[in-house]
Amino acid sequence: MKVARDGFRMLRREQLLHELVHDSYKSRHKLPEPTVCPKCGAVFHEGRWTWRSAPAGAHQHMCPACSRIEDDFPAGYVTLTGEFLHEHRDEITRVIKHCEATERSEHPLERIMAIEDIEKGLLVKTTDAHLARNIAERLHDAYKGALEFHYNKEDNLLRVLWSR
Ligand SMILES: [Zn+2]
């Protein structure tokens, strides 16, 4: 397997399913429970971040998603290009946002940080590699096109290219 100098490897979809690890931001601190994120209100409970309500007197610590947003350090990037994208930009943007809303309602750490216009199309930045993968899979399920995954396991960063 060829490893790029920046630590990214190109993976097939099936390989990615096996390789995608839990976010390093998640395990950096062992948090007391319950802990509430002062920024978004997510609550750390039984080893994971949830949307349950915080009990009075909960500890406070910023959740990994809010930390990434504050550090401007995305874990996932989805780059979208192509003629079809240009023609269906609004619809595709809605699909992406809907995918985020669904994932986020279950998994507080899966958020879109930004959807940016780039020269060749759109760039979606996410707080979690899983969300980047899910967005790309969702687009591929809906519209086909070409998918390419580049994964840096060391830092758990995922770059996905989708074009059609
Ligand atoms: Zn938070």
Image: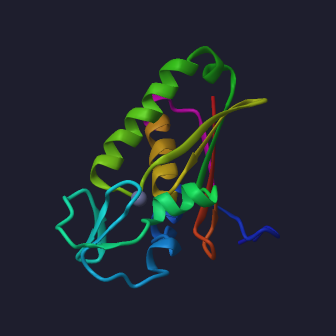
Q: Residue 153 location in percent, x, y? A: 60, 72
- The quadrant the C terminus occupies is top right
Residue 21 located left or right of residue 34? right
Would you identify the image quadrant in which residue 39 lies? bottom left
Front-most of 119 and 62?
62
Query: Residue at the location (52% across, 63% down)?
Result: 67
The magenta-colored residue range is: 141-149
Asked if 69 appears above or below 54 in the picture, the reply is above
Along the line of sight, the residue nearer the viewer: 115 or 136? 115
Question: Is any part of residue 12 visible from this angle?
Answer: no
Residue in view at x 18 percent, y 68 percent: 56
Q: How many marks?
A: 0
Q: Quadrant of the N terminus?
A: bottom right
Q: Residue furthest top?
A: 87
Query: Residue 112 in the image: x percent, y percent?
Result: 50, 45
Picture quadrant of ligand 1: bottom left
Residue 163: in magenta span: no
On the question of residue 80 being in view, the answer is yes
Foreground: 70 or 112?
70
Residue toward you, 135 or 84? 135
- State the scheme by which the image is colored: rainbow
Is residue 145 left or right of 4 when viewed as pictured?
left
| Rendering coords of residue 102 (x, y %) | 32, 42
Residue 142 in the magenta stretch? The answer is yes
